[in-house]
Image (tube, helix red, strand yellow):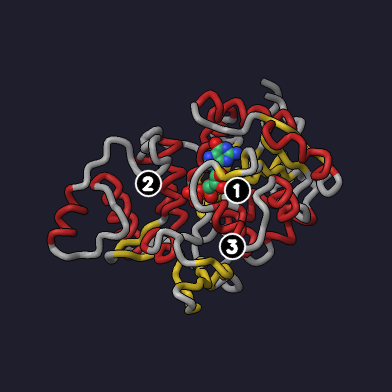
């Protein structure tokens, strides 16, 4: 290994966490910082729940349910079953082990700790030594405009995503609090670090996971101006989303399911773009809008896949691997 590298990764939940794990296996703890979307966070049953942060922590800690990509492996559902019997709100599944995370987070927040410090403490307890930083300590909440039975309405993100299973037609996405939420100080410090070598935009949903991060005051402008390479990995493989509602959302927003659509969306902030081999035919067209384009096997099913894509991303950006 050559000299020390410094990489900042911007990440959502399931797709982003997979590459974050790969990066954490290739880079040292002092070479990587993972900034996570908190637009999906909400308060439910009196508990503060941060779905993307928990997915990243569980993935890095090796205790994620690999079948779903979120939640904990070997989870039990006693709490949920009892709550359901009592007629409680059971539309958002909280496993017994997972529940402990939300209870402890809520306790610490109520005692006055900031989300970043709570996240750091809880991830350390689960054995994660790489810094996992919420994009902000403040509240920026994703809301969606939808149409259901001919009626337009505004829904909070989890109401749309989980309670209504993304069924209403999506018309628009807003980030409530975007003007007042400050990027986390460690996020800003990393962005402004003169030793920073690379910013990676993980293969997360561009509209729901990455956009909230970009919506924080000043962040888009910093990425547009930075001399540090910014490389995005496409979350679209073979003209389809690997999992989740990305395809439905893109169709409803009038966007085509092509790597090019994601490249076009990111073109003002990235200097490099990696797309999957299966979409390789699009590389030439993407090269016309983004200076450097790479083609790789981007489907991450095994830990080895995740490490390999992390290596290819660093190599693509000219870093020692
Ligand atoms: P969420 O917040 O849990 O929905 O997670 P993300 O936004 O981080 O990830 C969702 C996106 O990840 C979807 O668009 C998927 O297509 C993409 N994704 C999931 N797994 C993979 C993978 O192995 N490779 C790539 N390239 N994209 C993936």
What residue is shown with label 3? 252
Q: Disc 1 or 2, which lies upstream in sequence? A: 1
* Image quarter of residue 64: top left
What residue is shown with label 1? 10
Contact check, label 2 and label 3, Cβ < 8 Å:
no
Contact check, label 3 and label 1, Cβ < 8 Å:
no
Q: Would residue 209 appear left or right of 111 to someone viewing this image? A: right
Estimate the x, y position of residue 310 in percent, counting from the top left.
62, 31
Closest to the camera, between mark 1 and mark 2, is 1
* Image quarter of residue 275: top right
Count of marks placed on residues:
3
Q: Secondary structure at mark 1?
A: strand
- The Cα–Cα distance between marks 3 and 1, rounded to whole angstroms, is 25 Å
- Give the crowd class for mark 1: few <14, some 14-19, many >=20 residues within 10 Å: many
Q: Disc 3 or 1, which lies upstream in sequence? A: 1
What residue is shown with label 2? 122
- The Cα–Cα distance between marks 1 and 2, rounded to whole angstroms, is 20 Å
């Amino acid at each position: 290994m050559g000299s020390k590298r410094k990489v900042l990764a911007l990440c959502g939940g399931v797709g982003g966490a997979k590459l974050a794990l790969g990066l954490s296996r290739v880079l040292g703890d002092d070479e990587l910082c993972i900034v996570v979307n908190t637009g999906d966070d909400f308060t439910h049953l009196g508990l503060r729940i941060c779905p993307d942060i928990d997915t990243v922590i569980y993935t890095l800690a090796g205790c994620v349910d690999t079948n779903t990509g979120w939640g904990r492996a070997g989870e039990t559902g006693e709490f949920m079953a009892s709550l359901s019997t009592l007629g409680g709100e059971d539309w958002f599944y909280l496993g017994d082990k997972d529940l402990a995370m939300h209870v402890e987070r809520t306790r610490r927040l109520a005692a006055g700790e900031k989300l970043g410090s709570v996240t750091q403490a809880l991830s350390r307890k689960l054995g994660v030594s790489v810094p996992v930083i919420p994009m902000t300590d403040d509240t920026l909440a994703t809301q969606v405009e939808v149409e259901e039975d001919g009626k337009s309405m505004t829904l909070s993100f989890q109401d749309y995503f989980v309670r209504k299973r993304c069924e209403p037609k999506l018309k628009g996405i807003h980030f409530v609090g975007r003007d007042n939420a400050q990027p986390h100080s460690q996020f800003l410090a990393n962005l402004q670090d003169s030793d920073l070598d690379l910013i990676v935009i993980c293969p997360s949903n561009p509209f729901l996971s990455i956009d909230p991060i970009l919506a924080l005051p000043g962040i888009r402008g910093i990425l547009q101006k930075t001399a540090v390479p910014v490389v995005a990995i496409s979350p679209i493989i073979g003209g389809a989303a690997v999992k989740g509602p990305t395809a439905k959302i893109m169709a409803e927003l009038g966007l085509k399911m092509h790597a090019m659509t994601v490249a076009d969306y990111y073109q003002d902030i990235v200097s490099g773009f990696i797309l999957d081999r299966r979409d390789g035919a699009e590389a030439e067209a993407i090269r016309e809008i983004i200076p450097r384009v790479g083609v790789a096997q981007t489907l991450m099913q095994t830990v080895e896949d995740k490490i390999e894509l992390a290596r290819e991303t660093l190599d693509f950006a000219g870093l020692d691997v």
